[in-house]
Image (cartoon, grey):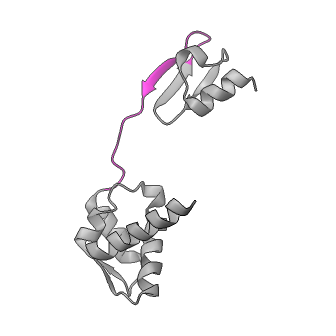
Amino acid sequence: MKEKFYNAIVNGVKASSFPRVPVDYGYRDSTYFWYTKFRKPIKCPIPNVQTNNLESVKYAANRIDPDIKFTEEACKMIVKVPRVFLKTVLNGCVSYAKEHNIKVIDEKVMKDINDKRRAEKGKR
């Protein structure tokens, strides 16, 4: 792959750096969906759709473990987590609760979990 195309993919695609190849099904980066017909590529913005609502998070949280319960305030804190990562986040919360003998995860416990995560992230 040519270096300028590699850099375009890594640093964000622009119409001027898009390779001159036919793209039948398109290419999606984090912001746009690109397609072309052997000409200058056309971009279509990807709609910003909120992936979860409070009810779906509460439903998933209360099904993850029968011994651990989540309050509504705790669920509000993870509404913006993408749906594909929701189960991982909930499993992490449940394992933290089991390590600390917590039966109900509320807003205070979620803040403790977030602080622990930030501290681990800062070490990397």
In which image quadrant can residue 40 be found? top right
Taking depth in this image into account, of 97 and 37 the one nearest to the observer is 97
Residue at 41% x, 82% y is 97
Q: Is residue 50 magenta?
A: yes
Q: Is residue 25 magenta?
A: no
Residue 47 in the image: state x and y as whole percent.
37, 35
> Going by the image, does 76 lie left or right of 63?
left
- Can you say whether 49 is above or below 65 in the image? above
Q: Locate residue 103 relative to residue 35 in the image: left or right.
A: left
Q: Nearer the viewer, residue 103 or 36?
A: 103
In percent of width and height, residue 13 lies at 55, 25
Point out the stretch of residues depicted in magenta.
36-52
Instruction: Assign the magenta stretch its main secondary structure.
Output: loop
* Quarter of the image where the C terminus is located: bottom right
Q: Residue at x 64, y 27 (%)?
A: 7
Q: Residue at x 44, y 63 (%)?
A: 118
Residue 11 position in % (x across, y down)? 57, 30
Task: Measuring from the top left, give residue 112's x and y in whole percent.
Answer: 36, 73
